[in-house]
Image: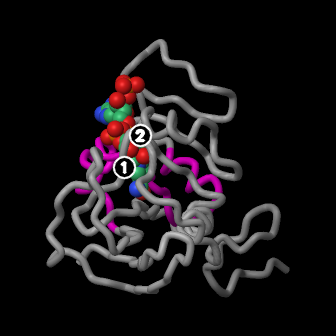
């Protein structure tokens, strides 16, 4: 006698319940730290030293695909471990170190980031900067992890202007850095 299935659970040949896996909708998010005037950088470096923010960045991005401009990659100087580092450049001759994926358009960068997320059953891929890349991708992003630093610095790289009415605040955590005496908040925004 053959047994008829009684439900529609999708089970793979390995017995894994596919229905329990995340669906294939990958959220595109960005992560940035900015001052009150949306400044994000000075001389291709971060304007502040906030160890807790670097830890937060690591927590949010670990294991995921991260997309960055070639200039931001230069400022990091190495691929970030435990993440798929996707670097976008217009220069066909640019050749980064082993451990990064080089692409020559943002479309290619986002397609690769999405594919990596799907393969790894992750629900999110992240844009990590810098200014040029944020400006070109902001319209496609549905979540922003913004570290709002309560200062104003004289920098040369800025996050684009955005309409706060289009975003809902999901969470906010305020912290203090003793060494620099800076207050800053980890804020998560979702597009309305
Ligand atoms: N505070 C933060 O959270 C944060 C995060 C990241 C970066 N930053 C800061 O941001 C600054 C860097 O920003 P940035 O605007 O100068 O540089 P960027 O956005 O990191 O990179 C710009 C480069 O990306 C490539 N690129 C841009 N658009 C492209 C496209 N459509 N197709 C192909 N390649 C493209 C080009 O590389 P090629 O020139 O090689 O063609 C371009 O010169 C630094 O000060 C950095 O410290 C701050």
Residue 40: percent from left, percent from top: 34, 54
Q: Are marks 1 and 2 in contact (CB under 8 Å)?
A: yes
Q: Is residue 7 above or below residue 155?
A: below
User: Which residue appears at 48% of the width and 12% of the height?
Assistant: 93
Left or right: where 118 falls relative to 105: right
User: Which residue appears at 64% of the width and 77% of the height?
Assistant: 20
Q: Is residue 10 above or below residue 78?
A: below
Task: Tell me which image quadrant ligand 1 sits in.
Answer: top left
Q: Residue tagged by mark 1?
A: 41
Left or right: where 84 falls relative to 127: right
Residue 95: percent from left, percent from top: 56, 19
Residue 92: percent from left, percent from top: 43, 15
Decide if ligand 1 comes within 8 Å of the CB at mark 1: yes
Mark seen at residue 44: 2
Mark seen at residue 32: none
SS for dot 1? strand
Decide if ligand 1 comes within 8 Å of the CB at mark 2: yes
Left or right: where 51 falls relative to 43: right
Among the 4 quarters of the image, the one containing residue 37: bottom left
* 3D distance between C-alphas at marks 1 and 2: 6 Å
């Amino acid at each position: 006698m053959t047994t008829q299935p009684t439900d529609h659970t999708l089970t793979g040949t390995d017995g894994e319940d596919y229905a329990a896996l995340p669906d294939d909708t990958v959220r595109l998010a960005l992560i940035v730290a900015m001052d009150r005037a949306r400044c994000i950088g000075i001389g291709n470096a971060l304007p502040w030293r906030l160890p807790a923010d670097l830890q937060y960045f690591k927590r949010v991005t670990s294991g995921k695909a991260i997309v960055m401009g070639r200039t931001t990659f230069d400022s990091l100087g190495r691929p970030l471990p435990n993440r798929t580092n996707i670097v976008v450049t217009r220069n066909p001759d640019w050749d980064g170190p082993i451990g990064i994926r080089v692409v020559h358009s943002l479309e290619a960068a986002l397609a690769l980031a999405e594919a990596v997320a799907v393969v790894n059953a992750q629900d999110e891929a992240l844009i990590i900067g810098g200014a040029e890349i944020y400006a070109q991708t902001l319209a496609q992003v549905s979540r922003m992890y913004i570290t709002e630093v309560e200062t104003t610095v004289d920098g040369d790289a800025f996050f684009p202007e955005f309409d706060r009415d289009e975003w809902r605040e999901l969470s906010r955590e305020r912290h203090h850095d003793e060494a620099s005496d800076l207050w800053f908040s980890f804020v998560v925004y979702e597009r309305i």
